[in-house]
Amino acid sequence: MPRPLSSQTIELVKQSAPALAAHGAEITKRMYTLLFQEEHIRALFNHANQGEKGSQVHALAAAILAYAENIENLAVLGPAIERIAHKHIGYHILPEHYPFVARALLSAIGDVLGDAASPALLEAWGEAYWFLADVLKEREAEIRADLDRRAGGWNGWRTFAIAERRKESDVVTSFILRPTDGQPVVRHRPGQYLTFRFRLADGSDVKRNYSISSGPNDEYYRISVKREEHGQGGSKFLHDHAEIGTVLEVTPPAGDFFLPDEPSRPVVLLSGGVGLTPMVSMLEAIASDYPELEAHYVHGALNSSTHAMDRHVRSLAKTHGGVTVRTFYSEPGSADAAGYSHDHDGFITANWLRENTPFASADFYLCGPKPFLRALVGDLTRAGVPSERVHFEIFGPADEKIAA
């Protein structure tokens, strides 16, 4: 562990919390502006989340404020630190990149706060930054060492070729990825994601995370990607340009949202839209490895045109007597009918879950759009489900509070 922070640093950082609450987004926006003057640092980031309204600006501002407010009780920040460490593995951020962030952050604090950013305050934040950086670097080193030890593991970028394309709905397509070196792949934990680096037609690179939708195996990964109409990122590249044989650059599986190795309680898998991808990975693992586990797969989609992988999910349920599948359509199409194309009209609710799942004893895993998460995570908490039994994944930076 890094050397403990001095009492003076702790006090000065705590005193800066109100200023960070008022000016945090301005500071982080300025920090990214300064940081991206370094081209090789700029290339490390997913720029879809940057900019004035970018969610990463607000996510980082919230993280810095949380650090200032909890600097005497860093255990509170443990989940956030784990999430950041896994993101750094995905984007291949290394120890030598940290000094660039330190200079940009301290300069941004000085630029935004002006005279209020005294030399003593900047020195305190420098000490605080490096303390947290050392915590992150230690955790990242542990994750990388574990990947190196495991069969099929790797660090950094590895090339994979698309072996199959499969249309799952009008908006979702699956891609089977096999390594070009013909060697095994590390078995991911069901729920984790891969990070991709795409070269676009204009010569620019973009990085994107996509959840793995297949269960753990030694040979391949599957991702199931929704085509996004806006922007020029990885979704359009995959849907419009990636063919069988296309080679992609990929970092190893990462992420702190996953099914535990030995589930001890019933499991309820809740998803909305393309948020089904980590849930299908979990369901494949349950069907393969946990024959006695009670599991409930509950999915919400607009209608049959957007509903992906339903036949596959129901086939898994047939092979595993303890799996129940229920689907909800919020906007059924003209050919859709409850009891035929899906099970229920409307939205998944906590009341329905209370009546139809092992509500009092289950672990709940959720993934989907932020409105879906805001509604269900809050409702589950208010309905009395302990927070330690509610696990959720946010696509993109966590720039807002989800739990009630």
Image (cartoon, grey):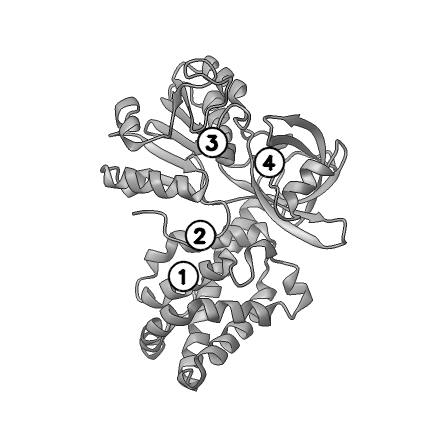
At label 1, counting other C-alpha atoms closer than 10 Å, the crowd grade (few under 14, some 14-19, many 20 or more) is many
Q: Earlier in the sequence, mark 3 or mark 1?
A: 1
One can see residue 46 in this view: no
Mark 3 / mark 2, whichever is N-terminal = 3
Q: Secondary structure at mark 1?
A: helix
Residue 366 visible in the snapshot = yes
Residue at image position (50%, 58%) is 56
As helix, strand or loop, the secondary structure at mark 2 comes to loop
Local packing at callout 2 (Cα closer than 10 Å; few below 14, some 14-19, many 20+) is some
Image quadrant in which you'd find residue 40: bottom right
Tell me which amino acid carries mark 2: Ala
Residue 120 is drawn in which quadrant?
Answer: bottom left
Q: Which mark is residue 279?
A: 3
Alpha carbon of mark 2 to alpha carbon of mark 4: how far?
20 Å
Task: Between residue 89 and residue 114, name the one nearer to us.
Answer: 114
Residue carrying label 4 = 225
Residue located 51% across and 30% down the image: 281
SS at circle 3: helix
Q: Residues within 10 Å of mark 3 (few under 14, many from 20)?
A: many
Which x, y percent locates residue 331?
A: 45, 28
Residue, disc 1: 62
Mark 4 Cα-neighbour bin, 10 Å: few <14, some 14–19, many ≥20: many
According to the image, label 2 marks what residue?
398
Are the residues flagged by discs 1 and 2 in contact, CB closer than 8 Å? yes
Mark 4–mark 1 Cα distance, whole angstroms, equals 29 Å
Q: CA distance from mark 1 to mark 2?
A: 9 Å
